[in-house]
């Protein structure tokens, strides 16, 4: 068993790299299909302004895409360096979607991102639109396969544990792929990305309108972002509700933790709007509730109870005791694979094997634990409630604020009066960072809420890590923080530079702020809607 320091540093390193990487991912997902919409309008109408919109927002997409790829590559290598036993234990299942992500998605998006940037003069309008669509599809396929892998970690289906090889083996690829947790997570995550891209375009367009720069370009960008963002915000909320329902089915511990629900309440359970959780005494020092709401959302019924944390701890104590039987039977099978009695006992208690493995962190001999040690291990199956509770509420609160923003933006832009609502434009501008916060808090809920499991209910985090020196983990963690922070600064500098320039960076001669050589005289100004000179 590796030390707690190695486990904590390995978790911290992966969390840091994942959170940095996810700064870039949502904008890539969102901008990709916004580019498709803008270019589709250009192909249908022939108005050059929509081509310019596609090219300009495509520049910002390209900057973000490059840095997203750079930060994402590191994470796949970390599975082999920092999580070697996890890779051994789940490689047959986990490796399949990651391989498909490389073959189907990464190569697709990498190929067509080149055609997007360099194919404007080499492809027909329809051909270039097809390239843009395939680039966006590849980007979203990449998210699909990664979230299929992550969804399996949340709910491991389509696999079985082999006591001979000590590994999980793939039984049904389609069960892994069609895992409802993975599919709900995929749609919820990409919809959050679409919201991020929409708020990004909305906010920068609002800044142009506030400054009176290129108003026609800004109005059209604002309108497209408002419509796409409104549909995306509705999707985020609906799929977030679905994720809560699936948590009640498969991860009751996560649901109880993010609701600070210590006791099992009569159905339907109330929703805690505000609470001050006290994990030591398993109670809330202060709470504001809305009756019935949680029960209706999480169970889709009036009479299904939701177990509280105290009840879950008691249930997990029983599962740990069963897990002890599975662990001892497994030890006997490893010594003598022909032991029929051990095999029968293992098959009987196999579903609780992970809970027996979890106990190993707290006792020297898992075959003879004390009741206190079992209770301690059962308490460890509950993640820290306070960060879960508030991360979820910040995420949900921001989600509804995005919906409100897009409703107003769509209404006023459809009436062509958004320039007369400076409060809406300022709201759009100041809200640019908010989708990033919502996405990060969402990942905290999803990943921290699964603790202490790498594979929920099957493999504890403490059994998943590589045996590495603490010094190397500290050194690599510091290196990643320094490198990723540098990349983030580079992204911000480039994004601010091109966003301030606006469509003038295209050097078409059609927009304000373009610099032209003094000897050439004033450039001809083309009308952005048609392409003729005026």
Image (spheres, rainbow, N blue to C red):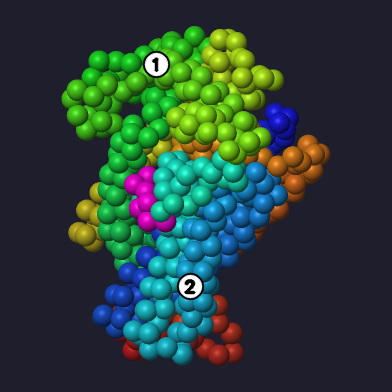
The boundaries of the magenta stretch are 173-182
Residue 344 shown left or right of residue 44 in the figure: right
Residue 270 in the image: state x and y as whole percent.
Answer: 27, 20
The quadrant where residue 495 appears: bottom right
Placement of the C terminus among the 4 image quadrants: bottom left
The structure residue drawn at horizontal position 35% and vertical position 81%, both measured from the top left corner, is 48
Mark 1 surroundings: few (<14), some (14-19) or many (≥20) residues within 10 A: some
**Depicted 503 relative to depicted 235: above or below:** below
Residue drawn 30% across and 18% down?
289
Which residue is tagged 2? 108
Query: 151 above or below 314?
Result: below
**Res 248 seen here:** yes
Q: Earlier in the sequence, mark 2 or mark 1?
A: 2
Question: Where is residue 498 shown, x and y percent of the image?
Answer: 54, 66
Nearer the observer, 312 or 92: 92
Question: Disc 1 designates what residue?
Answer: 311
Callout count: 2
In-front residue for pair 414/183: 183
Query: Is residue 421 located in the magenta-colored stretch of the structure?
Result: no
Q: Quadrant of residue 177?
A: bottom left
Residue 418, x across and y down, in percent:
28, 56
**Residue drawn at the location 51% of the way across and 50% of the way down:** 169
């Amino acid at each position: 068993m590796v030390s707690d320091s190695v486990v904590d540093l390995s978790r911290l390193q992966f969390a840091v790299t994942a959170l940095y990487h996810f700064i870039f991912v949502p904008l890539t997902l969102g901008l990709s299909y916004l580019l498709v919409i803008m270019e589709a309008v250009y192909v249908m109408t022939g108005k050059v302004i929509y081509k310019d919109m596609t090219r300009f927002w495509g520049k910002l997409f390209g900057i973000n895409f490059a840095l997203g790829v750079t930060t994402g590559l590191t994470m796949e290598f970390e599975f082999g360096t920092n999580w070697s036993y996890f890779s051994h234990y789940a490689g047959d299942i986990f490796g399949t979607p990651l391989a498909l992500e490389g073959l189907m998605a990464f190569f697709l998006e990498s190929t067509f991102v080149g055609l997007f940037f360099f194919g404007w003069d080499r492809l027909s309008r329809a051909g270039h639109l097809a390239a843009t669509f395939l680039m966006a599809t590849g980007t979203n396929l990449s998210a699909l396969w990664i979230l299929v892998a992550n969804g399996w970690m949340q709910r491991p289906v389509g696999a079985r544990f082999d006591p001979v090889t000590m590994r999980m083996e793939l039984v049904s690829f389609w069960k892994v792929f069609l895992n409802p947790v993975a599919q709900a997570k995929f749609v919820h995550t990409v919809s959050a990305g679409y919201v991020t891209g929409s708020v990004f375009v909305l906010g920068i367009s609002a800044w142009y309108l506030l400054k009176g720069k290129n108003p026609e370009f800004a109005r059209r960008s604002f309108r497209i972002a408002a419509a796409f963002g409104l549909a995306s915000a509705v999707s985020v909320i609906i799929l977030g509700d679905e994720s809560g329902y699936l948590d009640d089915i498969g991860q009751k511990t996560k649901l109880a933790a993010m609701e600070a629900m210590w006791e099992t309440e009569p159905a339907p359970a109330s929703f805690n709007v505000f609470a001050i959780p006290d994990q030591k005494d398993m109670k809330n020092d202060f709470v504001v509730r809305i009756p019935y709401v949680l029960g209706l959302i999480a169970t889709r019924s009036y009479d299904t109870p939701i177990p509280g944390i105290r009840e879950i701890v008691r249930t997990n104590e029983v599962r740990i005791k069963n897990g002890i039987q599975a662990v001892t039977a497994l030890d006997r099978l490893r010594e003598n694979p022909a032991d029929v009695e051990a095999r029968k006992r293992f098959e009987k208690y196999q579903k609780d094997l992970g809970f027996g493995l979890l106990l190993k962190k707290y006792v020297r001999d898992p075959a003879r634990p004390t009741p206190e040690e079992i209770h301690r291990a059962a308490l460890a199956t509950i993640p820290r409630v306070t960060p879960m509770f508030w991360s979820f509420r910040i995420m949900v609160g921001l989600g509804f604020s995005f919906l409100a923003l897009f409703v107003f933006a769509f209404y006023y832009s459809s009436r062509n009066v958004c320039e007369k609502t400076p409060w809406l434009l300022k709201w759009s501008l100041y809200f640019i960072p908010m989708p990033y916060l919502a996405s990060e808090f969402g990942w905290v809920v999803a990943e921290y809420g699964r603790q202490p499991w790498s594979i929920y209910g099957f493999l504890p985090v403490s059994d998943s890590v590589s045996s590495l020196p603490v010094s190397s983990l500290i050194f690599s963690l510091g290196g990643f923080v320094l490198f990723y922070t540098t990349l983030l600064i580079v992204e911000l500098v480039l994004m601010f530079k091109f966003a301030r320039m606006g469509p003038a960076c295209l050097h078409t001669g059609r927009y304000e702020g373009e610099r032209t050589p003094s000897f050439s005289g004033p450039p001809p100004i083309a009308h952005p809607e048609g392409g003729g000179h005026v």
